[in-house]
Amino acid sequence: MRLKLRVFHRGLLLVGAPLVLNLTLIAALAFLLQQSDREQAFEFRYRNLTAVSGDLFRLAYEAPLTLYLALQTRNPQLFKLCDQDIAALKEKGFKSIDRWQRDPLLSHKAAAGKKNLADLVDLMEDLSSVRKAGGAIELLSQLPNVTSRLLAVKDDTLNTLAGFQKVGYERTQASQRSQENMRIAQIAILIIGAALNIIVGLLLFAFYQKGICARLQTIHSNTELLSKGAQMHEALSGDDEIAQLDQAFQQMAIELKQASEREKALFDNASDVICVLNQSNNFVKMNP
């Protein structure tokens, strides 16, 4: 069954088509902006991960070396600096790793990292406690073994922190690439949206010109021809309001023509004299 587009429906199409198109474009842009905000949050999180893990890497690298030098030189300043590094590792390291454990990308590394960091901190605190208790000579006698254990734990901790740094760097780069792709997609949607709006506008203009404006122009022309008694244009096709109005004028023209023919037949075949005078009493028309 053929779709019947009445004038109201055509007007609705003229308004609705651009509206639907632009709402779709707005929804696509809103989705991309939401995803872009999400990626920005990821970038900030993993950039922070890279910075914090880098700082912990530095502390985990420097603290054992400082302790080793302090044990060899028995320098109070080095012991004090070592205690500060241990406190920083405990405060910043465990708090950061506990936060990373809630991240799906880091949870598998966080448990191992927490254990390695705890082993390193415990070993350094034990050595520092022995030194404070007056066992510096005993530590010096066992320095090769202590150094070996300290370096082994330090290497494990550094490898774990380097893994955190790698994940943070890679995820930061991925978020930046994703944001760049989304910016390109947003520009593409804006360009495509502008082009589609122009195309839809031209199509709707052509539709309005042909489907509404041209048909109304035909009716206007038919009314003028009807008033002059001239032959009207061919009837408009369709069954919408414009076509129905034109059909009414066409029917009116037919009825007027029939009435005119009946009048002419009556005028020409009358047995009596029938004449028509103007305002000046001059003969205008007379039957034969």
Image: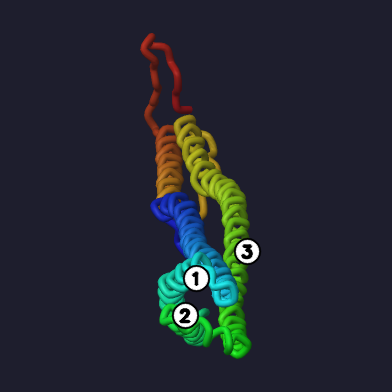
**Residue position marked by numbered label 2 in the rendering:** 131
Tell me what residue is drawn at x 54 percent, y 73 percent.
Answer: 74
Near mark 3 (Cα within 10 A), the count class, few <14, some 14-19 or many ≥20, is few
Place of residue 263 in the rendered image (x, y in percent of width and height, measured from the top left): 40, 36
Asked whether disc 3 touches disc 1, contact meaning CB atoms under 8 Å apart, the reply is: no
Real-space Cα separation, disc 3 to disc 1, in angstroms: 46 Å
**Which residue is depicted at the point 51% across and 38% down?**
217
Structural distance between the alpha carbons of marks 2 and 1: 9 Å
Give the CA separation, mark 2 to mark 3. 51 Å
Relative to 152, is 74 above or below? Answer: above
Callout 2: SS: helix
- Which disc, if any, is residue 79? 1
User: Looking at numbered disc 1 in the image, what kind of residue is underneath it?
Assistant: Phe
In this rendering, is residue 263 above or below 45? above
In the rendered structure, which disc, 2 or 1, sits on the residue that comes first in sequence?
1
Q: What's the mark number on residue 117?
A: none
